[in-house]
Amino acid sequence: MSLETTYKILSATTQSEAVGVLARGAASGVLEVQSRCYRTLVYRRDIASHEAVLARWPGDQKLIADAIDQGDGGPRLNSSTRADSPAADSQPTDLPSEGNGKEVSDRSGQTRSLDCPFLKSVMQWLDGPDCDEKTLHKTIEIVSLFQMRDALPRLISLATSHASHLVREASVEVVLSMAQIWGRQARRNYAGLRPSPDMERKRIAVTTMLLNTLVQFQSHRQEGLLDSFLVLVTWNDPCLQSTLGQDTPCRTLILRRLRNSRRQNVMELLAGYFRRRTIPDCVLSLLLQRKDATYRESLLQSISATPTAATLANLKEYGLPDCLRGGVAMLRDLGIDRDAAVAHAYSTAMQQDPETIAVLLEIVDRHRDRIANAKAESKAKGGSGKVADEVIDSVAISLSRCECPNMDFWLDAFASGIMDGNIFSELEHEDSHSDRAAKICLRLIELSQNDFPAFAKAGTRLLSELTIQKAISAFPKLSEDKKMRLGRALMQVDSSTLEVVKDGLRHAVMQRRLEAIEFTQTLGLVDLMIEPLAVIARTDHQTARLVAVRALGTSQGEASSELLKELADSHQGSLRDAAVVSMKERGMSV
């Protein structure tokens, strides 16, 4: 008789001696023999076999678990095909099978159906009113290992009513562990696949049972059951919606936990409301006012790099949540993997605030080297150099949402000495609103010259209020430093600057001509504008002629030199004197 036939007989025989033989083999210390004996024992259908296995738990836990996972090595005599056959194992891991037997989760939390007699006995022991504490601990460990969801109602009952504190705590721990896995799958719609028909009915039944324990919370004080409820429910569950809609002690308990819990799946429940079209009023204040960093991570994960229409609508209606406030300083506390979500949040909730532009430009800087390297690598491989990147796309979209700062904002920027330096040589500490505005200005000028067309277009658009047409009237009121900074910026930003200045020198209104002369002098453009300045110096009103002559004294060109010599021979004394002064300032002989 072959060894294979022997094990088949031992798996099917009803003689009690077979259990003793298999139990001795399981305790033999010979790994191959132990493994085969356990595989036979767990699939026998008598309680004595299962008691022999339980007696070896947890010492041989791995061998027993592997035996259950692997099955009995093939069809047993007089047995039906198991639900964990290769066909069942090949189905998508997030889709539960619909075979007979208990619905179970494997040790990675992926649901499947196991037709294992030993696990059925575990359920019977767990349900038995006379089960001793030691056996209960073992069965709870097995339920946890195999994520046996059908055991949840009994575990919840043990958690609230068993006499042993250790049993209660162990039950709560396992309930919470299974609830977290099941709730995570449910909130993600089981990876987009349809669960077995009764999967959701079972989950709803368990959440209802957990909710009932919250009504009696003061009697058992098991916060783990409260957390279990909050990690298992989804936003659409009727029991959660009805509870949040009524002012009851149970709702107060839930809201307090949502406010204070650091458990990821609980915070996910709260943060996930930002993706909902309807947010309960009692949740809204928590959603917006909770400030801790761990919740911020959950909220940014909920917003994501590709926010839903409902998310964007909520951000626009309710504004930026408190945990995301802080601008650039807040951003620097985060990893770059959250940058896309931050960009969407700020640009949707604070479109009109220049701080949003500062945050977006900081994100561009954070990814500068990575994007440059990716472009270089693409070109080195013969590509176009274009880089597909969700952060680039998110920032480009976000920049397009921002409102353009007005001229007053830019004039404030020119009060800062930062405008005299390079953006990369700025002090980290920004002391004033002017400093922050200056930083935005310099970065936008740089962005408008970026290699990425979307960035360049966005930078140019956001600088659209900074124009020579709007600046020239404010120019005479500015200090010399501000004039120089404004002029340099306009030369980089507004391509029409020179033409507008030239037109200003020819303007019919003398005040506009005087403003244009001052602008020309301040920016050192006299030699470029010598033709209209010559017309003013020769033929204009006396006041304008004197101002033009003084401007000629700041130039260096030959044409302006010849013009000053000509004016020095003028019959008008005041004009002649002004020309002589300008010549002396240039070191010319009179």
Image (cartoon, rainbow, N blue to C red):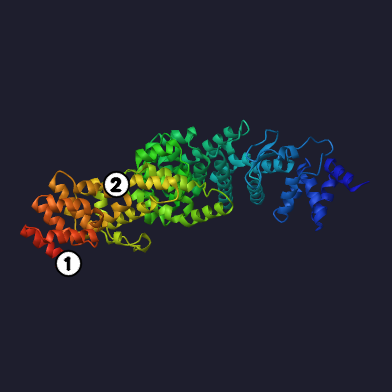
Among all residues in the image, which is located at the extreme top? Answer: 197
Residue 290 in the figure: left or right of residue 225: left
Label 2 vs 1, first from the N-terminus = 2
* Element type at mark 2: loop
Closest to the camera, between mark 2 and mark 1, is 1
Which corner quadrant of the image does residue 485 belong to?
Answer: bottom left
Q: Could you tell me which residue is drawn at 52 percent across and 46 percent down?
A: 388
Expressed as whole percent of the image width and height from the top left, the position of residue 52 reads 76, 49
Expressed as whole percent of the image width and height from the top left, the position of residue 350 reads 34, 44
Mark 2 surroundings: few (<14), some (14-19) or many (≥20) residues within 10 A: some
Quarter of the image with the C terminus is bottom left
Looking at the rendered structure, the kind of residue marked 2 is Ser
Which corner quadrant of the image does residue 424 belong to?
Answer: bottom left
Q: Is residue 148 above or below residue 560?
A: above
Q: Is residue 199 above or below residue 537?
A: above
**Residue at the disc numbered 1:** 585
Q: Could you tell me which residue is drawn at 45 percent across and 38 percent down?
A: 275
Residue 199 in the figure: left or right of residue 244: right
Expressed as whole percent of the image width and height from the top left, the position of residue 399 reads 39, 45
Residue 190 in the figure: left or right of residue 466: right
- State whether residue 469 appears in this view: yes
Of 54 and 558, the residue lying toward us: 558
Residue 496 shows which numbered tag? 2
- State whether residue 414 appears in this view: no
Residue 9 shows which numbered tag? none
Looking at the rendered structure, the kind of residue marked 1 is Glu
Expressed as whole percent of the image width and height from the top left, the position of residue 482 reads 23, 57
